[in-house]
Image (cartoon, grey):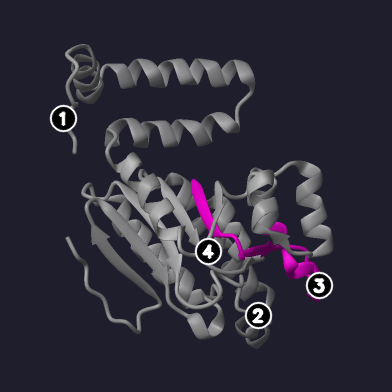
Amino acid sequence: MSHEQDNDALVLRSDADGITTLTLNRPNQYNALSKAMLTALQLELDQVAIDKSVRVVILAAQGKAFCAGHDLKEMRANHTEAFCNALFQQCGELMLSISRLPQPVIARVQGIATAAGCQLVAMCDLAVAVNTAKFATSGINVGLFCATPAVALSRNLGRKQSMELLLTGDFLDAESAQREGLINYAVSPEELDAKIAKLAQSIAAKSAVAVAMGKRMFYQQLEMGLTDAYRYAADVMACNIMSDDAAEGIDAFMQKRHAVWKHA
């Protein structure tokens, strides 16, 4: 299936074989997250969330930068606490939407990702970047501690690594980002799309029920204590094994054939 969109849209969507690509489309502004950009991306995510034909989402960007964070010009032009609070709350809801989306989201990072752009990478379930990409929470350089990006960063990196980035604003190269857990892979530009396609296709071939249930469980258990996490995980597994897809998958395994998922 192909989904055509106006090339002037802030977020472009394309669909193929159960994989949806959402592309940030403000290249001249380094894909800064203006209020309009946040609204456009939220709308696309909301539509994907209820689209059962979508198995995996790739979050990409046009131009040299993946995302340079919030639109500083817009914030200075609307320099009121009410506007900025609403903007950051809107951004927070967008980030939560990525975690709540039934489908896994893979960040395709072709350039720099700074401040809320780095946050965006951290909130995606998986991330693949070109080996020339750089990451930073650079707000501190303009007198603004990246508080909201810190939420995502501290849930991906170690505490001291997170604090170093947040307090210095220094860039982290792709190799270091992979080593410290911000991204899954750092690859050459020529390998980027093939690596992402391999990941996406592998996930798209799995049971959508199991993937959605597992993604939801993964993030919920992270906020729990160990005992509660195991209780919750046991409940999820018991529910999962009663699904049609689990029955089909186990039967297919025992019969040495490929599973045909009931909820494809």
Dot 1 crowding, Cα within 10 Å, few <14, some 14–19, many 20+: some
Q: Earlier in the sequence, mark 1 or mark 3?
A: 3
- Occupied quadrant, residue 214: top left
Residue 70 lies within the magenta run: no
The tag earlier along the polypeptide, 1 or 2, is 2
- The amino acid marked with disc number 3 is Asn
Residue type at mark 1? Answer: Val
Q: Looking at the picture, how far across and down is residue 134, in whole percent?
A: 66, 64
Secondary structure type for disc 1: loop
Residue 104: which numbered mark, if any?
Answer: none
Q: Nearer the viewer, mark 4 or mark 3?
A: 3
Mark 2, Cα crowd under 10 Å, few <14 / some 14-19 / many 20+, is few
The residue at which mark 2 appears reads as 72
What's the residue type where badge 4 is placed? Gln
Judged left or right of residue 203, residue 121 is: right
N-term mark: 4 or 2: 2
Q: Secondary structure at mark 2?
A: helix
Instruction: Tell me residue 223's x, y (percent).
Output: 60, 33
Q: Are marks 1 and 2 in contact (CB under 8 Å)?
A: no
Q: Amino acid at mark 2?
A: Leu
- Disc 4 residue crowd, few under 14, some 14–19, many 20+, Cα 10 Å: some
Residue 90's mark? 4
Judge whether 71 appears above or below 53 on screen.
below
Q: Which label lies toward us, 3 or 2?
A: 3
Q: Nearer the viewer, residue 184 or 123?
A: 184
* Residue highlighted by disc 1: 260
Q: Residue at x 54, y 69 (%)?
A: 66
Q: Is residue 262 above or below residue 143?
A: above
Stretch in magenta: 125-148
Instruction: Kindly report the distance in space between the C-alpha atoms of the residues bearing marks 1 and 2.
Output: 50 Å
Mark 3, residue position: 141
